[in-house]
């Protein structure tokens, strides 16, 4: 299951993602991101602390969000490693 919450304020937008970014949920996150990116107040911060697992398709969606300007944020060990890997990437690569 995946839960996506959006909160907007004058200082930007926060997208909170919780659950597992796998399988069909990757498509759902990508679809939500496209809607949010078109209309949200910038900057857009994506909080990933509630994410418990990300598959390769999920990493690809997060990479695309990062390239599109999302600020990926995480403090848990696993998600920090995913964010660091994505932020350090110069081009998309499957993992």
Image (cartoon, rainbow, N blue to C red):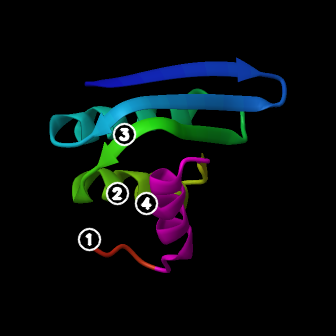
Earlier residue among tags 2 and 1: 2
Residue 18: in magenta span: no
Q: Which mark is residue 26?
A: none
Q: Which residue is mark 3?
A: 52
- Contact, CB < 8 Å: mark 2 with mark 3? no
Question: In terms of secondary structure, where does tag 3 sit?
Answer: strand
Q: Which mark is residue 59?
A: 2
Q: Residue at x 25, y 25 (%)?
A: 1
Name the front one of labels 2 and 3: 3
Q: Residue at x 55, y 76 (%)?
A: 88
Q: Examine the image and state in which quarter residue 84 appears.
A: bottom right
Q: What residue range appears in magenta?
A: 74-90
Instruction: Estimate the x, y position of residue 27 in percent, counting from the top left.
Output: 24, 39
Q: How far apart in space, not on screen, are marks 2 and 1 (Cα)?
A: 8 Å
Q: How busy is the neighbourhood of tag 3: few (under 14 within 10 Å), some, or many (20 plus)? A: few
Question: In terms of secondary structure, where does tag 1 sit?
Answer: loop
Q: How far apart in space, not on screen, are marks 2 and 3 (Cα)?
A: 13 Å
Specify the quadrant that holds the C terminus: bottom left
Residue 79: in magenta span: yes
How many tags in the picture?
4
Residue positioned most to the left: 23
Instruction: Estimate the x, y position of residue 45 in percent, counting from the top left.
Output: 65, 40
- Contact, CB < 8 Å: mark 4 with mark 2? yes
Q: Which residue is mark 4?
A: 63
Q: Is residue 87 above or below residue 16?
A: below
Q: Which residue is mark 1?
A: 95
Earlier residue among tags 1 and 3: 3
Name the front one of labels 4 and 2: 2
Earlier residue among tags 2 and 3: 3
């Amino acid at each position: 299951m995946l839960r996506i919450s959006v909160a907007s304020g004058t200082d930007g937008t926060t997208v909170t993602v919780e659950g597992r970014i796998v399988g069909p949920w990757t498509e759902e996150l990508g679809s939500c991101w496209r809607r949010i990116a078109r209309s949200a107040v910038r900057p857009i911060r994506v909080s990933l602390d509630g994410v418990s697992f990300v598959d390769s398709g999920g990493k690809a969606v997060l990479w695309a969000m990062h390239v599109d300007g999302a600020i990926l944020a995480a403090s848990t060990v696993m998600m920090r490693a995913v964010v660091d890997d994505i932020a350090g990437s110069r081009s998309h690569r499957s993992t």
